Amino acid sequence: MSDRPLRYFPVSWDQLHRDAKALAWRLAEKGPFTGIVAVTRGGLVPAHIIARELDIRLIDTIGISSYDDTQQREMVVLKDKEGDGAGWLVIDDLVDTGKTGRVIREKLPQAHFATVYAKPSGRAVVDTFVTEVSQDTWILFPWDSEPQYAQPIAATRGRAAD
Ligand SMILES: O=P(O)(O)OC[C@H]1O[C@H](OP(=O)(O)OP(=O)(O)O)[C@H](O)[C@@H]1O
Ligand SMILES: Nc1nc2[nH]cnc2c(=O)[nH]1
Ligand SMILES: [Mg+2]
């Protein structure tokens, strides 16, 4: 996403757990899998939840980074994975533009690629996902956020209570 997101889609730990479990239900019938490749960093927490649900103990990683905060920049591949991905399940938190997903597809063409969330531009690159959000939405994960005080509606309209 190059411009400031129009809206946020905040995801709580509970919601992420529920959505990752929903993804695990969909993946249960697509296996068995040799192991999981988590796309770090965003894929790490969903990969853990899915590994637990599908009783997968073998976890590898591929490291790809292409955002600073909400700004997309040049992609850096920090850690690669050998092979064509046959039998492996690749897990990331989301696809946005689909750029990261396309690189994963090139590197691991035989793997099953799944994400918890997907935006329209990236949807076609994923084999399985759970929830679609609009392209101008920024998914706000629990590890990127914290609860804070919110002004009452009256105060935000310049009308404090007497
Ligand atoms: O579809 P795209 O437009 O390529 O965006 C999706 C990727 O962006 C985020 O990773 P990021 O590069 O922020 O690194 P991180 O996982 O280490 O936070 C997210 O975790 C996906 O991997
Ligand atoms: N947290 C987060 N990271 C992203 N990377 C690319 N798109 C997104 C998004 O919507 N939310
Ligand atoms: Mg990522």
Image (cartoon, rainbow, N blue to C red):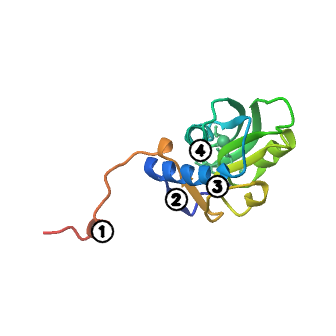
> Could you tell which of marks 3 and 1 lies nearer the N-terminus?
3
**Cα gap from disc 3 to disc 4, whole angstroms:** 30 Å
Name of the residue lying farthest toward the left: 162
Q: Amino acid at mark 2?
A: Phe
Q: Nearer the viewer, mark 2 or mark 3?
A: 3
The residue identified by callout 3 is 26
The residue identified by callout 1 is 153
Front residue (pair 51, 99): 51
**Cα gap from disc 2 to disc 3, whole angstroms:** 23 Å
Mark seen at residue 19: none
Q: Position of residue 22 (x, y in %)?
A: 56, 54
Q: Amino acid at mark 1?
A: Ile
**Cα gap from disc 1 to disc 2, whole angstroms:** 20 Å
The reply to whether callout 3 and callout 1 are in contact (CB within 8 Å) is no
116 with respect to 151 (left or right) = right
The residue identified by callout 4 is 69
Element under label 3?
helix
Q: Nearer the viewer, mark 3 or mark 4?
A: 3
Element under label 1?
helix
Q: Position of residue 120 (x, y in %)?
A: 71, 64
